[in-house]
Image (cartoon, grey):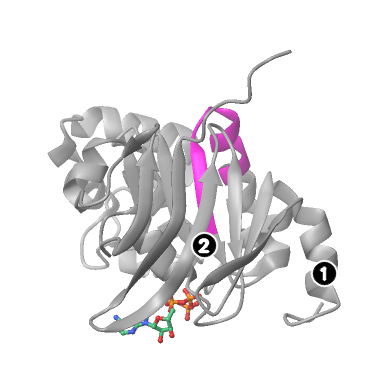
């Protein structure tokens, strides 16, 4: 019998908040190597705050944040980036007034050469090669998301945190972006993705966690959770 692999990233009963206001009331979550975990739920449920915990932006007040079995409570965003955690925030985080090339250059701070970053980006997303001199802000939402992904991948992360990948994108582009996410997981990357629109991510998720009012109220098979969601809070 093969041993169950240890989660790469794990939250155990994590409580956190903003100032005196607690917004995460004991969140537990596990992300295994090569998995795509979909963090679902309505606005204000705590998805973004959970991602902020995982990227070191929001400190853990109680409970444990573990990375590869090691407790990393107190690690800041730079520490976690060095440990292989990379975030694409809501709104993508590309610099609209910089070109594609210049946006990639920003990721050279982690030690990868611009040439290597460009080669990898243009190979994965040929359209970015054609747009290398174009301002990021003038590109389509999907192209900006490709640029954000390329920059993130340039740091050779082991964990990718995605917040509302689908935001502002046409349904066809969302499907394409999630196909890319599935490919990345197939290459071994572990991915935690917060999505308000469950249908976008469920086809490629290995598991799903439903967040309501600062708690994970349900985790499990994405299709089962999809069925539950269709008949409850989020509509079809
Ligand atoms: N910077 C902040 N200061 C104070 N409260 C905040 C802050 N950010 C979020 N909150 C509160 O924390 C709770 C969880 O919000 P969070 O953004 O994590 O939820 P979400 O599920 O990601 O929703 P959304 O899709 O709107 O981002 C909400 O009640 C929100 O009002």
Above/below status of 203 relative to 168: above
Residue 64 pos. (x, y %): 37, 50
Q: Residue at x 30, y 60 (%)?
A: 60
Q: Residue at x 56, y 33 (%)?
A: 34
Please give left or right for residue 221 compared with residue 190 in the image.
Answer: right
Q: Is residue 124 magenta?
A: no
| Residue tagged 1 | 228
Secondary structure beneath label 1: helix
Image quadrant holding the N terminus, namely top right
| Residue tagged 2 | 165
Is residue 120 visible to the viewer in this orientation of the structure? yes
Q: Residue at x 37, y 38 (%)?
A: 67
Q: Quadrant of residue 95?
A: bottom left
Residue 236 pos. (x, y %): 82, 77
Secondary structure beneath label 2: loop
Is residue 139 visible to the viewer in this orientation of the structure? no
Highlighted range, magenta: 181-193
Above/below status of 214 relative to 20: above
């Amino acid at each position: 019998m093969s041993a169950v692999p240890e989660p790469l990233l794990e939250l155990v009963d994590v409580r956190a908040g903003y100032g005196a206001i607690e917004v995460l009331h004991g969140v537990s979550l596990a992300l295994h190597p090569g998995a795509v975990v979909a963090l679902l739920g309505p606005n204000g449920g705590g998805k973004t705050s959970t991602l902020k915990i995982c990227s070191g932006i929001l400190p853990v007040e109680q409970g444990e944040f573990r990375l590869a079995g090691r407790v990393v409570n107190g690690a800041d965003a730079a520490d976690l980036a060095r440990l292989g955690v990379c975030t694409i925030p809501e709104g993508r985080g590309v610099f609209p007034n910089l070109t594609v090339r210049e946006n990639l250059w920003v990721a050279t701070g982690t030690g990868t050469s611009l040439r290597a970053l460009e080669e990898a980006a243009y190979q994965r997303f040929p359209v970015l090669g054609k747009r290398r001199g174009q301002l990021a802000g003038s590109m389509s939402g999907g192209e900006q998301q490709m640029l954000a992904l390329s920059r993130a991948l340039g740091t050779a992360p082991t964990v990718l945190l995605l917040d509302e990948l689908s935001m502002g994108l046409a349904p066809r582009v969302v499907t394409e972006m999630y196909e890319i996410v599935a490919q990345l997981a197939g290459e071994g990357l572990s991915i935690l993705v917060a999505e308000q629109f469950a249908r976008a991510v469920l086809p490629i998720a290995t598991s799903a966690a439903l967040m309501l009012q600062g708690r994970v109220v349900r985790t499990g098979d994405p299709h089962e959770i999809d069925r539950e969601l269709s008949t409850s809070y989020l509509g079809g």
